[in-house]
Amino acid sequence: MSLAPETKTKIDEILSSSKIVVFMKGNKLMPQCGFSNNVVQILNSVGVEYATFNVLDDYEVRQGIKEYSDWPTIPQVYVNGEFIGGSDIMIELYNSKELHEMLEVALAS
């Protein structure tokens, strides 16, 4: 399956809407899976502004984002349009303190 041009455009538009975007199940107020909740908790604890996109509301984006990033799972975190990773990677970056630095740099740019 290849990424439809209109789906790629939609994903590009979502990514350009905020410096930090999380494609997840649910939203930051009501995460609908444990992995999405992990990412929300991490970003909330770091205290940064971020946008979420609920993939449960849009099948095309839910499938398309996996091809867009070449990453098979949700959630997916993007900083300045660049794919950072999912729940496990976010936990790793948070625990190593790399995440704080990465987000400060991204938000300053």
Image (tube, rainbow, N blue to C red):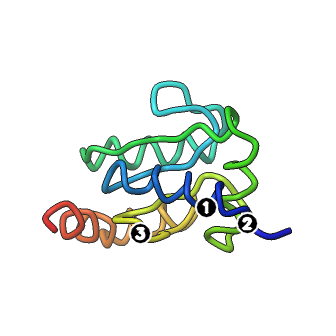
Q: Residue at left 32%, top 73%? A: 98
Q: Residue furthest front?
A: 6
Q: Residue furthest top?
A: 30
| Mark 2 or mark 1: whose residue is earlier in sequence | 2
Q: In this orientation, which residue lies closer to the viewer: 78 or 97?
A: 78
Q: Which residue position holds label 2?
A: 3
Task: Classify mark 1: residues with Cα within 10 Å, few (<14), some (14-19) or many (20+).
Answer: some
Identified by mark 3, the residue type is: Leu
Q: Which residue position holds label 3?
A: 93
| Mark 3 or mark 1: whose residue is earlier in sequence | 1
Q: Which residue position holds label 1?
A: 8
Instruction: Name the mark nearer the viewer: 3 or 2.
Output: 2
Q: In this orientation, which residue lies closer to the viewer: 11 or 100?
A: 11
Q: In this orientation, which residue lies closer to the viewer: 90 or 75?
A: 75
Rendered position, 3 above or below 7: below
Identified by mark 1, the residue type is: Lys
Rendered position, 28 above or below 13: above
Q: Residue at left 67%, top 49%? A: 61
Asked if disc 2 and disc 1 are in contact, CB closer than 8 Å, the reply is yes
Rendered position, 30 above or below 86: above
Measured from the top left, where is residue 50 in percent x and y?
Answer: 34, 45
